[in-house]
Image: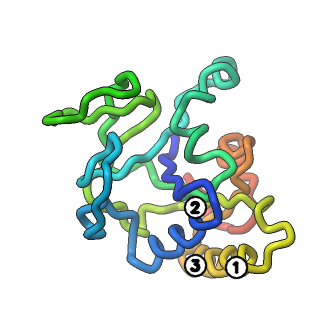
Amino acid sequence: MGYYYHGTGYNEDALDTMIQIIESGGIKSMNQRNTYYDTLYNGEDYISVSKWIYDDKEAESSYKDSSFYGWIFNMPCFIIDDSIEAIHAKKVEHGYNLDHNKERVSEFVDEWHVKDIISLDKIVGIALPFGWIKGSLIILKKVLVILKYAKENEWQVYDSNLDLIKNVQSEELIYGTKKLS
């Protein structure tokens, strides 16, 4: 059993994004948010999620070019129950022409797409980059807001460091009592 992961960004704005997602009732596609900009592989109707697909032997050499490494490790992310309906995106080369393409594609082998919305009841945990807090009262306040929501929703809380997968699998968490499985 694995989980899906949805990262919210790579700077302190990612914490604001995480709060907005929680307050809006779920992770939503651009169409669901009435937000439009140059689309990525997930397009306007889908949400990109990552899944850890590597075993210990191949992880070190393979994951650095993955969506997991780019959007999950050391960044704020949601940990999502694997019962959601997700489509495994076909791997294509960077620069693939998306015009008129109906099939789900990504430049990452470990990316899946979810249509429209992932409701909060499908989120089982969050991971936060606790190293970001050092010396920043603004970031600390945002983290405390997120932790309040995590407590209200009974989500597990993890540090999003490079041991995230091992910690989720062994249930080594920062906060929480609810079992993921």
Tally of numbered discs:
3
Q: Amino acid at mark 1?
A: Leu
Q: Residue at x 18, y 35 (%)?
A: 99
Measured as percent of width and height from the top left, residue 168 is found at 66, 48
Residue nearest the observer in this picture, 5 or 30: 30
Residue nearest the observer in this picture, 115 or 134: 134
Q: Please, is residue 14 above or below residue 104 in the view?
A: below
SS for dot 1:
helix
Q: Please, is residue 150 above or below residue 1 in the view?
A: below
Q: Please, is residue 4 above or below residue 178 in the view?
A: above
Q: Going from the N terminus, do you reach mark 3 or mark 2 first?
A: 2
Give the left or right position of residue 59, taking residue 111 as reference. Answer: right
Badge 1: few (under 14), some or many (20 or more) residues near its Cα, within 10 Å? few
User: What residue is disc 2 on?
Assistant: 125
Give the left or right position of residue 18, taking residue 122 as reference. Answer: right
Q: CA distance from mark 3 to mark 2?
A: 11 Å
Q: Residue at x 42, y 37 (%)?
A: 111
User: What residue is disc 1 on?
Assistant: 144
Measured as percent of width and height from the top left, residue 175 is found at 73, 67
Q: Amino acid at mark 2?
A: Gly
SS for dot 2:
strand
Callout in the foreground (2, 1):
1
